Image (cartoon, grey):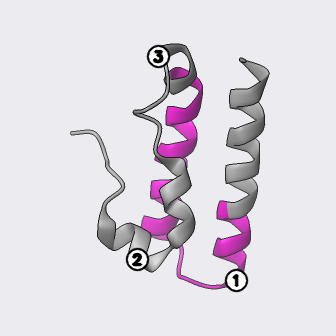
Amino acid sequence: MEPKIDDDMIALDPIMRYFHYQHLPLHLQIISRPFTLLAISIVSICPRNPERTVALRKLLEAKDCAVRAMI
């Protein structure tokens, strides 16, 4: 089963709302999906603290750059 970003996850870490990828065209979904899966893993495994927040922010930055590279 595909891990999903749910409302509880977004409530805990609002940055997670930016990791949705299903709305993107398929060629961009392929790029974005691994970043989403990693973000879900980080939230699931790492304790909530400033370093986790920085990790998610930098991951989001990297995802945005990778998606833009494909446009």
How far is the residue under mark 1 from the one under mark 2?
16 Å
Do the residues under discs 3 and 2 have CB atoms within 8 angstroms? no
- Total marks in image: 3
Residue 30's place in the image compared with 18, above or below, is above
- Residue at horizontal 31 percent and vertical 67 percent from the top: 7
Residue at image position (58%, 42%) is 35
Amino acid at dot 3: Leu
Q: Viewer-proximal residue, 25 or 42?
A: 25
Identity of the residue drawn at 40% across and 33% down: 22
Residue where numbered disc 1 is placed = 50
In the image, residue 46 sits, relative to residue 19, either above or below, namely below
The CA span between labels 3 and 1 is 33 Å
Identify the residue at the far left of this view.
Answer: 1
The mark lying in front, picked from 3 and 1, is: 3
Mark 1: few, some, or many residues within 10 Å (few <14, many ≥20)? few
Is residue 68 depicted above or below 39 in this figure? above
Label number found at residue 6: none
- Residue 61 picture location, percent across and down: 75, 49
Majority secondary structure of the magenta segment? Answer: helix
Q: Is residue 34 magenta?
A: yes
User: Can residue 61 be found in the magenta stretch?
Assistant: no
In the image, 23 versus 62, the foreground residue is 23
Q: Quadrant of residue 48?
A: bottom right
For the C terminus, the image quarter is: top right
Q: Secondary structure at mark 1?
A: helix
Which numbered disc, 3 or 1, marks the residue that appears first in the sequence?
Answer: 3
Q: Which residue is mark 3?
A: 26
Residue that carries the numbered disc 2 in the rendered image: 11
Amino acid marked by disc 1: Pro
